[in-house]
Amino acid sequence: MSTQIPKTIKAIQVDKVGGPEVNVLREIPTPVPKENEVLIKVQWTGVNYIDNYFRSGLYPVQHPYTVGQDAVGTLVQAPTNYPIKTGSRVFTTAGSAFAEYLVAPRDRVAALPDEIDAKDGVSMATQGLTALYLLKESYAVKKGDWVLNRAAAGGVGLILTQIAKHLGVNVIGTVGSQSKVDIVKQSGADHVLLSSDTSESNVKKILELTGGQGVHAVYDGVGKDTWEEDFEVVRRKGTIVTYGNASGAVPPFPPAKLSPKALKVTRPTLFAIVKTQEEWDEYTSELIEISKKAKIHYAVHKEYGFSAEDVIQAQKDIQGRGTTGKLLIKVSDE
Ligand code: NDP
């Protein structure tokens, strides 16, 4: 395949810590892959909640940095003997994805089968892989378990419920507003609770639903606001998986907090769980299989254009708690 690689590309960058308005669109030199890297021409990318943590300074970054996590596009340059042919459609979690071209480590790229839509591939990257590892490793679910899925209408949340149901798990989802209840039910959740209801009534309902015992695991990407409640709704010997900070980071706590119920708490990240080539291959192929077998629906909240205004709006939208599923950004037609 002969793709003319331009000398410069358009990219969304951030030069300082701040709100969504610090995103700017600018022309930068086309990144050049090193020995163990590949070059991808980006077609679709998408917003992840983590973009806010990098931009706001919660997770420090070096400025200027190119925004974005995951992308679907065409592999245009790769080392000799690379297992994926140039010209193939691929998905990646490489970062610097709000750009016309991105460089990815050779072990962060997977071929996207023809039968999977390019837009689905964007949701599969960060959010799909996260949902899968949470259920496989952070607390490895068993058929018949009860789990609590916080922010169940979000990008990770909607996928997590579908995979959990495929594995025979009972799912209770929480959402911030009534308008999200139906979409979470459609994703297969057995029960949906409103996080705006009182904590007492939600704890009571969860205990009732689980025969007074509580859930085997809580998957919590909300963080600070729901942290204390997690301890009330998880059963003895259960697991709290705290994997995000949408409402702020959870506070430090003494290990003795775990002792009354002999609990486990884990704080995973995708980058620490899916790190080696073997882990990447295992997780991406399993996610592709499950997506086909369980007919996972990768919901899209909205498609945005590739401009600073669009990115600013999209980041405001995801922070505003009104979104469900993936916020996609179209970078090019192919
Ligand atoms: P979502 O689409 O789930 O958006 C975040 C959701 O969090 C909102 O829609 C909202 O849902 C909920 N929320 C609760 N409280 C607040 C608040 N105070 N401000 C804003 N939102 C709030 O985002 P993603 O799917 O991209 O990510 C979900 C979580 O998973 C994030 O915390 C993210 O950082 C984390 N994550 C972690 C990974 C890891 O490996 N550790 C990898 C990928 C994501 P509602 O209003 O319904 O409560």
Image (tube, rainbow, N blue to C red):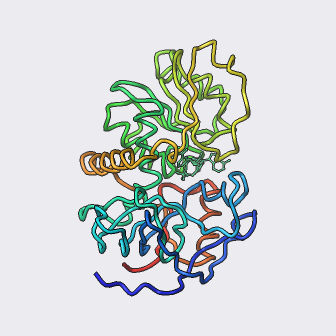
**In the image, is 114 to the left or to the right of 222?**
left
Q: How many marks?
A: 0
The residue drawn where x is 47% and y is 75% is 101
Taking 231 as reference, is 9 above or below it?
below
Q: Nearer the viewer, residue 308 or 84?
A: 84
Q: Residue 258 location, x and y as percent?
A: 63, 19
Q: Residue 209 location, x and y as percent?
A: 47, 23
Q: Give the image quarter of residue 279.
A: top left
Q: Residue 34 location, x and y as percent?
A: 47, 68
Q: Quadrant of the N terminus?
A: bottom left
Q: Give the image quarter of residue 81.
A: bottom left
Q: Nearer the viewer, residue 1 or 231?
A: 1
Q: Quadrant of the C terminus?
A: bottom left
**In the image, is 213 to the left or to the right of 284?**
right
**Looking at this rendering, what residue extends furthest in the top direction?**
260
The residue drawn where x is 58% and y is 22% is 204
The residue drawn where x is 47% and y is 53% is 126
Taking 245 as reference, is 82 above or below it?
below
Q: Residue 33 location, x and y as percent?
A: 47, 71
The residue drawn where x is 37% and y is 43% is 162
